[in-house]
Amino acid sequence: MKSDLFASEHLAEAATFPGMTLQNAKSVKYTVQGEMQALQGSMIAFRGNLQFEHKSQGLGGLLKRALTGEGLPLMTVRGQGEAWFAHEAQNCFIVEVEPGDALTVNGRNVLCFDSSLSYEIKTVKGAGITGGGLFNSVFTGQGKIALICEGNPVVIPVAPDAPVHVDTDAVVGWSEQLRTSLHRSQSLGSMVRGGSGEAVQLKLEGQGFVIVRPSELTPQKKSAN
């Protein structure tokens, strides 16, 4: 049988080392030798001897998710084999976290990660209960995490003399060491006249980076999350 479908860029090659790699722009391949963590329902195929189990967030995580909608609905994948992960054809990117690093990520942008990484759902300081939510997931340790994003993200450096303001519905993640607060960029008079649609942003200060996606959550997507 012949087709462009069988070109090398579409074929799943045999694994040469454990862990995650990009299968293509829309999916991640993970060679499991032990266990890893992934977004519930994100597995699209696997081969080998693998088991998929619900991972509890604990009482604290469940309460935070119930209050804000933020959190990590995860599953643990155990065994020996290969699995492929994707979510709504969103673009995939792999970030390698090194000792001493700390990455804050919106839960909706996490696809899968190594079990060697630790994560905690923390309060976004100074943000209040608005926009992207009160809680984000902070990853530390050593290992890889796969992020998903609608479209190609923009990574913006943050410098001590150049704070960055981001839309809370567009932000994917940022360096944990950055200071966060809410910034109002719209005058009261403008709000009374109907507003600009850009009333409040998340302000990030310090030294690091912030990742934003080229889209915002629609009311339908917000309710789905």
Image (cartoon, grey):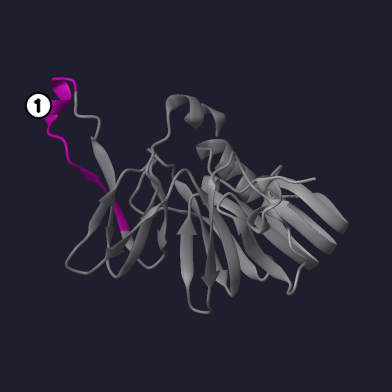
Q: Which residue lies furthest to the top in this view?
A: 193
Within 10 Å of the Cα at label 1, are there few (<14), some (14-19), or many (20+) other Cα atoms?
Answer: few
Magenta segment: does it hold 129? no
Identify the element where label 1 is drawn: helix
Where 38 falls versus 219 (above or below)? Answer: below
Q: Which residue lies furthest to the bottom in this view?
A: 99
Q: Where is residue 155 in the image (x, y as percent from the top left)?
A: 35, 59
User: Amino acid under label 1?
Assistant: Gly
Q: Which residue lies furthest to the left in this view?
A: 189
Location of mark 1 (residue):
189
114 left or right of 203 in image: right
Residue at point 84%, 55% (across, down): 47
188 left or right of 58 in image: left
Residues shaded magenta: 180-194
Residue at point 13%, 30% (across, down): 188
Q: In which quarter of the image is the N terminus?
A: top right
Q: Where is residue 151 in the image (x, y as percent from the top left)?
A: 44, 45
185 left or right of 34 in image: left
The answer to which quarter of the image holds residue 133 is top left
